[in-house]
Amino acid sequence: MVFKSNLLCKIIGFIHLINNQLYKSKYLTIFKRLGSHSVIALIALIVIGGSTRVMEAGLACPDWPLCYGSFLPFNHMNLRVFLEWFHRLDAFLVGILILFKFALSIIWKNEIPNWLPKTYSLLLFLVIVQGSFGALTVINLLDSYTVTGHLLIAFLLLITTISINQNLENDYIEEPLIWWKLLLFFPLLLTLIQSFIGVRLSSTWSAHICLSFNKQCLILNTHKLFAFPIAFSILLIIATAINKRSLLNENWKYLSALILLLFSQIALGVLSLKTNLSEPIFIIGHQLNASLFIAILTTLVFRNPFTKKGLNHSLNSQMVGINS
């Protein structure tokens, strides 16, 4: 009788675990989908912001948050006004999306991991800071440091969002691989620095001054110099993955994308300089590549290549208990 009672308790606990895990997975699936949309929206926001800067449309709307005193300035609409207006609209929609995720995390806090509402509160704080920097770029008439800070917060938003997505996938981590994460973090940090130098380069007109008058070339030369350690670190990552075949098998799609982005980024940078920065398509493509580069590196940093699903792991543990 005692044996039957213990077995019945384990079976009931097993059924309860299944129901509980499936119940929670429904909510986590929603957050994963919203997170994927957020990543796409943030990359689009960064690229549109870069396009606005390249097309010198940062002050096309002289007021903030409205544009010429209205939500949709039909009477003043042209390409530059449209770029600045659409950039603000996209930023507003991203903010609403993140606010929506934060609200859901509060409502469903008992059904999701404890860290999720806290992380979404950080994400919401970054959105508020980002909006403040957006206002300051207009008020301070595109001050270089303000524009650079604006991009910094955008990249922090992107990195934080991707880290949340990957942590939602990593329900159970078999092997953290800290050395692999550190190896990936180095080019991520260098790419962020490279991007900030690029913003300083464009917002201070240093590139045009250097190419036209051969003066103030320090920022441009530094920007070009940073391409070498980034390229070397990416090649080192590829070589390491090839040497440890399991890493290559689990991450080959991301690593292939990194190689493709590395060579296309170098090509776009060379073309931008060869055309004296007169072709916006090359500069905008350069910005898009940098955003994708950061997104993929961040995914690899927070992605565990040997992840096991938490549901399977928990079920297996319960099965062992029942069998014993």
Image (cartoon, rainbow, N blue to C red):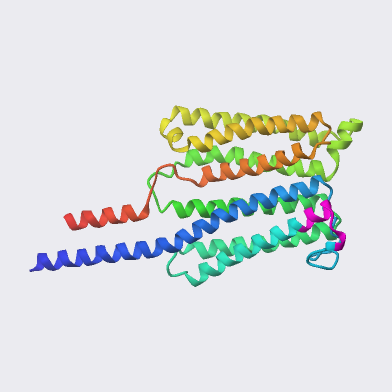
- Most extreme residue toward the bottom is 107
At which x and y percent is residue 234? 58, 32
**Quadrant of residue 122 within the rendered picture:** bottom right
Front in this rendered view, residue 94 or 127: 94
Q: Which residue range is magenta in the image?
A: 75-85
**Whether residue 143 is visible:** no
At which x and y percent is residue 34? 54, 59
At which x and y percent is residue 119? 55, 61
Q: Quadrant of the C terminus?
A: bottom left
Which residue occupies 61% across, 63% down? Answer: 97
At which x and y percent is residue 125? 64, 63
**Whether residue 175 is visible:** yes
Which residue occupies 17% across, 55% down? Answer: 323
- Most extreme residue toward the right is 213
Which residue occupies 61% across, 51% down? Answer: 40
Q: Quadrant of the N terminus?
A: bottom left
Q: Is residue 118 found left or right of 320 in the rendered image?
A: right
* On screen, residue 41 above or below 1: above
* On screen, residue 129 above or below 200: below
**Quadrant of residue 264 within the rendered picture:** top right
* Number of callouts: 0
Front in this rendered view, residue 237 or 179: 237
Judged by its main secondary structure, the magenta piece is helix
Which residue occupies 57% across, 42% down? Answer: 296
Q: Is 78 in the magenta?
A: yes
